[in-house]
């Protein structure tokens, strides 16, 4: 059992801006539009949505988010229950983890999560009775002692053929009643043999073997949910509620049933009547809905992406693009209609769905230049968006066949990635076609190019255009890489060149043909992620020259032993920060930040030592202006405020934060807007040296301490920066207040 403080200070209104978030801080960007469960806790309404959790302050209507970043132990919230008597709440997660929120602390009970169970292991429902939480699970009724915060017992219900899944429970007199996958059963709650399934009997009147999804006690009777049309049943604040996908039946007095329908009801998952008799409805499409006197009042959906599924991330022109498409190993389409979620600098989100994108599904990547957006659809070509509106969807007909349909379909155009070259030409990779490398020139001419591979087995993933305008493409399904150049003459195919990069000496010497990611660092080196670590091309300009260009691996020495950098990891993504360090996402081991040359591990984040939602990292993008690192996992998006930004071409607008430094602040102080790798000195007002460092890209970091390790005294401190030509000048001032 673990206990940690719940960070209520982070339960802030969602409209607050966080441009000056402290170095080392985390932030989540989850989707909350698909509501599934509701719970009242004092003056708050909690809502589970997309596996996340938020609450509405009933008096102010302010929305607040609760997540792993604010102190929860896990991700994927399934349900929450509150006990006013005990002044605590219980949270269950999809992975069977349990949190108890009590006295501004979180007590984690992970026994069920860690328990090895044959078959399915889920917790379906919570019911708090006195000092015990009864958890209905796939393998029995679990009793949690809420005083001692421990598993008290487990009751199994079934017969000689096996245990039944318990979906809900209720209490009537001295009886515990459970809804199972094989009918409704009861037993005396005071019995000493409840762990023995023979102590449980079929409830009269409920002897059929239907699957009951839940059961509630109402006065002297029970009500069970076994109808396929019913989506939920609940009893709270003297109201019995049954929901279908588009209606809510409310029974307040035991006799009169009011059926409520509304245009907002699209796919109802749960309903709740609060202590003021307001009706709250959780809808998987419309979010959390509030009704007063059965009249629609308001909907609540915190700002965020339309869904948590991520295929790729791109931060460009002050916006974060989160693409939601997908496919099964570059074969069968996922047919995801949600397209892309776009975050601006004020954390406001916009969604382009399939209809906004000209019926293009499975959006995998985006390329943006001067505000014009091009999207790679694994289903339907390249939509072009200007000022938020579809201009054209580029396909076979309007590109003179350059964007060809795949060999077995007359309408499917599979684009995996898009990138601009230095001249503003747009390059694309198209799969299962004879001419897979495609370009749209600045003057809107389209050309395509072939490579000597069968279209039947030609699948692309990532695209990189390097500083030499060479095009690097990942050949999916374990086929290495391809490098292509049109030698700056897109209209003339006679001087085109390409090379297949594989594991052979003289042909790239990759550590594996299973390649996943590409990145070019600030020195022009090409970093390649494989399922056996990282390969680096130190001389990519030699690919077509005949000189040696084979990749190398970084040898890490620890004691008497040496091994190649991350050679046992599947490298899903590599992103370069302003200090030329590498942020590396893996499939199973989280995120690594390594030094410029790859020889030093700077940071390593996992779900166990950080707020990461998962160790399976899908993609990473960086806001180079403020150092925010966006980390996409298979459970959703988080960010980390790092200590590096992109270096300025000249020192103009220097920003220091926080400023002033208040007496209660003990975090890092950031100095932004410096030239790349500038030398920075902090002096007192009389010129005495306090601190000296080198900027990470365009950002210098000071911990607020002098050379003796003591906190700087109250006063004004000067920031001096020396650029690459050796000239030094005062670029800012820092005020300390004690």
Image (cartoon, grey):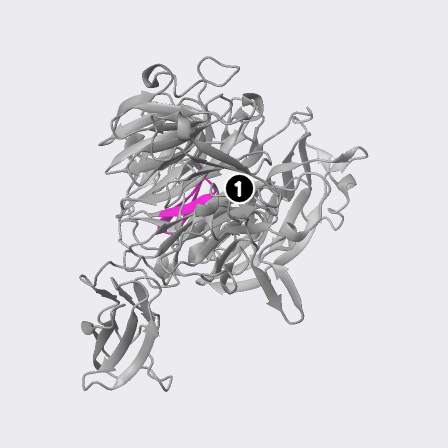
Image side of residue 69 versus residue 18, left or right: right
Q: Residue at x 21, y 85 (%)?
A: 687
Give the position of the C terminus as an image quadrant.
Answer: bottom left
Name the dominant secondary structure of the magenta segment.
strand
Residue 627 versus residue 180 in the image, above or below: below
Q: Residue at x 47, y 46 (%)?
A: 542
Q: Secondary structure at mark 1?
A: strand
Image side of residue 688 versus residue 437, left or right: left
Q: Quadrant of residue 186?
A: top right
Which one is nearer the viewer's eye here, 222 or 369?
369
Image side of residue 718 versus residue 172, left or right: left
What's drawn in magenta, residue-wise? 36-55
Tell how many labels.
1
Q: Quadrant of residue 341?
A: top left
| Residue holding disc 1 | 516
Task: Estimate the x, y position of residue 286 in percent, counting from the top left.
Answer: 36, 31
Q: Residue at x 49, y 31 (%)?
A: 326
Task: Estimate the x, y position of residue 75 in percent, counting from the top left.
Answer: 50, 48
Task: Estimate the x, y position of residue 129 in percent, counting from the top left.
Answer: 56, 49
Q: Quadrant of residue 454?
A: top right
Residue 623 versus residue 322 in the image, above or below: below
Residue 469 versus residue 387 in the image, above or below: below
């Amino acid at each position: 059992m673990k206990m940690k403080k719940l960070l209520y200070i982070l339960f802030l209104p969602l409209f607050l801006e966080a441009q000056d978030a402290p170095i080392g801080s985390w932030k989540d960007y989850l989707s909350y539009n698909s509501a599934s469960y509701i719970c009242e806790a004092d003056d708050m309404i909690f809502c589970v949505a997309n596996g996340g959790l938020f609450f509405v302050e009933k008096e102010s209507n302010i929305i607040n988010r609760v997540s792993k970043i604010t102190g929860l132990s896990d991700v994927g919230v399934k349900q929450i229950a509150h006990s006013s008597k005990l002044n605590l709440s219980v949270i269950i997660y999809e992975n069977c983890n349990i949190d108890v929120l009590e006295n501004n602390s979180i007590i984690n009970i992970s026994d069920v999560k860690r328990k090895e169970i044959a078959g399915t292991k889920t917790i379906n429902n919570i019911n708090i009775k006195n000092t015990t939480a009864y958890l209905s699970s796939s393998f029995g009724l679990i009793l949690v002692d809420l005083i001692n915060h421990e598993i008290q017992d487990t009751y199994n219900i079934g017969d000689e053929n096996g245990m039944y899944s318990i979906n809900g429970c209720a209490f009537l007199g001295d009886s515990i009643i459970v809804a199972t996958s094989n009918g409704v059963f009861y037993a005396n709650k005071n019995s000493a043999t409840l762990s023995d399934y023979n102590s449980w009997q079929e409830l009269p009147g409920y002897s059929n073997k239907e699957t009951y999804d839940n059961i509630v006690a109402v006065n002297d009777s029970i009500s069970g949910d076994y109808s396929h049309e019913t989506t939920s049943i609940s009893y709270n604040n003297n109201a019995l509620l049954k929901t279908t996908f588009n209606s809510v039946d409310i029974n307040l007095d035991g006799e009169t049933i009011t059926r409520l329908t509304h245009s907002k009801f699209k796919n109802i998952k749960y309903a709740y009547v609060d202590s003021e008799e307001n009706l709250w409805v959780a809808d998987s499409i419309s979010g959390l809905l509030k009704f007063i006197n059965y009249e629609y009042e308001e909907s609540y959906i915190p700002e965020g992406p339309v869904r948590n599924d991520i295929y790729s991330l791109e931060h460009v022109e002050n916006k974060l693009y989160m693409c939601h498409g997908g496919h099964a190993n570059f074969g069968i389409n996922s047919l995801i209609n949600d397209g892309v979620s776009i975050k601006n600098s004020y954390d406001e989100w916009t969604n382009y769905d399939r209809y906004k994108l000209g019926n293009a599904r499975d959006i995998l990547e985006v390329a943006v230049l001067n505000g014009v957006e091009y999207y790679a659809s694994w289903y339907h070509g390249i939509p072009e968006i200007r000022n938020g509106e579809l201009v054209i969807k580029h396909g076979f007909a309007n590109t003179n066949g350059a964007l060809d349909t795949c060999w077995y379909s007359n309408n499917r155009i599979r684009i995996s990635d898009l990138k601009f070259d230095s001249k503003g030409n747009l390059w694309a990779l198209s799969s299962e076609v004879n001419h897979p490398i495609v370009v749209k020139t600045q003057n809107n001419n389209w050309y395509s190019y072939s490579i000597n591979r069968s279209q039947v087995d030609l699948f692309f993933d990532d695209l990189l255009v390097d500083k030499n305008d060479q095009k690097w493409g990942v050949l999916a399904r374990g086929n290495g890489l391809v490098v292509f150049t049109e030698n700056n003459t897109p209209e003339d195919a006679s001087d085109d060149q390409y090379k297949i990069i594989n594991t052979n000496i003289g042909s790239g010497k990759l550590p594996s043909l299973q390649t996943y990611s590409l990145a070019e660092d600030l020195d022009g080196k090409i970093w390649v992620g494989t399922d056996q670590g990282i390969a680096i091309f130190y001389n990519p300009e030699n690919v077509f020259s005949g000189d040696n260009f084979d990749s190398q691996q970084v040898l890490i020495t620890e004691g008497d032993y040496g091994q190649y950098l991350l050679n046992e990891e599947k490298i899903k993504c590599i992103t370069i920060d302003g200090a030329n360090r590498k942020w590396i996402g893996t499939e199973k081991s989280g995120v690594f930040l390594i030094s410029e040359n790859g020889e030093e591990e700077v940071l390593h984040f996992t779900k166990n030592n950080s707020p990461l939602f998962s160790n399976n990292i899908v993609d990473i993008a960086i806001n180079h202006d403020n150092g925010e690192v966006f980390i996409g996992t298979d459970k959703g998006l988080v960010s980390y405020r790092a200590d590096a930004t992109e270096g300025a071409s000249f020192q103009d607008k220097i920003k220091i934060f926080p400023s002033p430094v208040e007496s209660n602040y003990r975090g890092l102080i950031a100095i932004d807007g410096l030239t790349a790798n500038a030398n920075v000195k902090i002096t007192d007002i009389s010129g005495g040296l306090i601190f000296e460092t080198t900027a990470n890209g365009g950002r210098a970091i000071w911990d607020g301490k002098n050379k003796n390790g003591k906190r700087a005294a109250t006063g004004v401190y000067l920031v001096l920066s020396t650029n690459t030509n050796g000239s030094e000048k005062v670029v800012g001032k820092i005020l300390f207040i004690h």
